[in-house]
Image: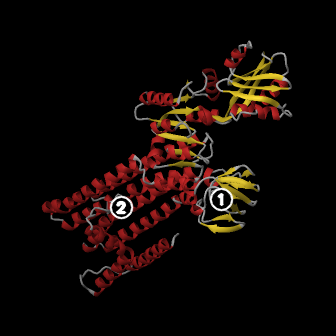
Amino acid sequence: MSRKQKKMLVRIIAAAMIFAAGLFVPESEETFSVLWFVRLGVFLCAYFTAGWDILWKAIRNIAHGQVFDENFLMAIASVGAMVIGEYSEGVAVMIFYQVGELFQSVAVGRSRKNISDMMDINPEFANVERNGEVYEVEPDEVQVGETVVIKPGERVPLDGEIVFGSSGMNTAALTGESAPREVTVGDEVISGSVNINGLLKIRVTKPYSDSTVAKILELVENSSENKAKTENFITRFARVYTPIVVIAALLVAVIPPLFTGDWGGWIYKALTFLVVSCPCALVISVPLSYFGGIGGASRHGIMIKGANYLEALAKAQTFVFDKTGTLTKGSFAVSEKYSEGISESELLAYCAAAEQISNHPIAVSIVNAAQSLGDIPKAENAEELAGFGVKAVVDGKEIAVGNARLMEKIGAKMTEKSSVGTIVHCAVDGKYCGYITVSDEIKENSKEALVELKRLGAERTVMLTGDREITANAVAKTVGVDEVQSQLLPDGKVKAVEELYRGKLPNSTLAYVGDGMNDAPSLARADVGIAMGGLGSDAAIEAADIVLMNDNIQNLPLAVRIARKTRRIVMENIVFALAVKLAVLVLTLFNIGNMWAAVFADVGVSVIAIINAMRCMRIK
């Protein structure tokens, strides 16, 4: 507990002890007797010990035109009870209200813990190396290109590339993964992660304002501004509901006594109305539930920019996926080799020798595959033919490596083959010698994630890609999406999302899942945009509403479960609070309910709703 919370606890205990003492003072049948003054004095002492700040807030808010709030209701109800002689109940209302407020404060503090842990990723300083000396400076004072020294146990202050040392890197605060990443010279590291065991030097590649940690902190700080529709509804509801109940209480206090003459009894009922009408259970528990859901998601490396996106995800029934980098790894590898007249190893060596001049991902994957088998022959007179491929001389032979158009251009008769992936053909001295197929590897858990989504009730899953139809269909069949659209340009993806949006189920939302790099228009068009691979990806953090920081697609169904459980808890709290309050109001009218029942309907319901809301932080 904070110092302020501890002080409040002391006040409550003190007030409760004085209150208990007052209960032992006998009631006097004579008003203004010594015993009556003693009893009143004890209860007034307990009352002001517990609630002086509530009275002050009510007076201050009325002076500023803010009349109908919980402070006003508690002040009027408790003071009214004291005026009509119900001292114990008037004091009890204030004490239990403060208990509820303290419980709320502690609960909010706990729900903020995961978010505050995320805020702790902010580095306090950077050890920058200048002219052979190391200076401790603010992270935002370090320039791009400077070298920063990171000792074991220190947090990485800025994004950069390792130029010296190797170590394990703890990224748990960013990705939710407990296993450390091993890094060495040439690897990129991101701000916010913790150096575990080795001295590192990194060359800064981004200013602090553009670093991963700065963008995440901005995301977290702004998340509370994006309220869910349910939150906004409850806020508007409280503004209307509270004045209506106050007016109803006034009518109950005035109109029935005109006919029955029982002014004390009806005023007591009216004061009970005021206690019951306090909307604390709703106003506190609904935002707390969403806040807890966002905090719980952050524990798993799922960054949600606001409660409105959490609510939108809870209603998602249509899930649209990009292929590369989302359902697949986005890294190419040789998946098939076919040779004619030469061995497969010779085919791979010739292709790799020629492709060494290219930095295209497909060329790199062929070179890597050849290197794993041995040395690559030296190529001479290598040249890249734009739109066709490459040509080079290897061991005195002219090698041509590229697409089908290159084979046609040099007159090499190809063997027609249907293969999943990108086909790279090869000819030696003008004679066709075979091909190599390079494919994007499917993520191991893509299929499991799709199965889990459908188990959660996803009605439609669609994959959009710019890849060839045969490749797209093969990936779609493997991972289990319902539909696939291939050979789409970026604007074609947006049009496809538009069509899917028009065809979604009523009262449902559409979620687009992409890698955040070239899917920004589609991410923006969807009801909720979800970016994969947020670790170090600026575009992902900026374009998406939700970011899966650890690039694990299995966190998508987890995010859906968190969103739906949060929404379910919110609805439980709303229904429970309103039902109990309505029941107590009705019972009070029929002389069954009293001020103690009203205290439960306010404070008790608030505490129960808060406990229920805190479940959002423990969803797995």
Per the image, label 2 sits on a secondary structure element best described as: helix
Residue 582 seen in render: no
Circle number at residue 597: 2
Residue visible at 47% across and 51% down? 290
Q: Callout 1: 10 Å neighbours few (<14), some, many (20+)?
A: some
In this figure, which colouring scheme has been used for the structure? secondary structure
Instruction: Estimate the x, y position of residue 301 in percent, counting from the top left.
Output: 59, 49
Circle number at residue 493: none
Circle number at residue 146: 1
Instruction: Estimate the x, y position of residue 540 in percent, counting from the top left.
Output: 55, 44
Residue 42 seen in render: yes
Per the image, label 1 sits on a secondary structure element best described as: loop
- Spot the residue most to the bottom: 34
Instruction: Estimate the x, y position of residue 391 in percent, counting from the top left.
Output: 75, 25
Q: Is residue 280 left or right of residue 318?
A: left
Residue visible at 73% across and 59% down? 200
- Tell me which amino acid carries mark 1: Glu
Callout 1 touching callout 2 (CB < 8 Å): no
In terms of sequence position, does the residue under pointer 1 or pointer 2 come before the other?
A: 1
Q: Callout 2: 10 Å neighbours few (<14), some, many (20+)?
A: many
What whole-number distance in Å separates the C-alpha atoms at marks 1 and 2? 67 Å
- Spot the residue most to the left: 258
Q: Is residue 37 above or below residue 527?
A: below
- Tell me which amino acid carries mark 2: Ala
Q: Is residue 107 above or below residue 310?
A: below
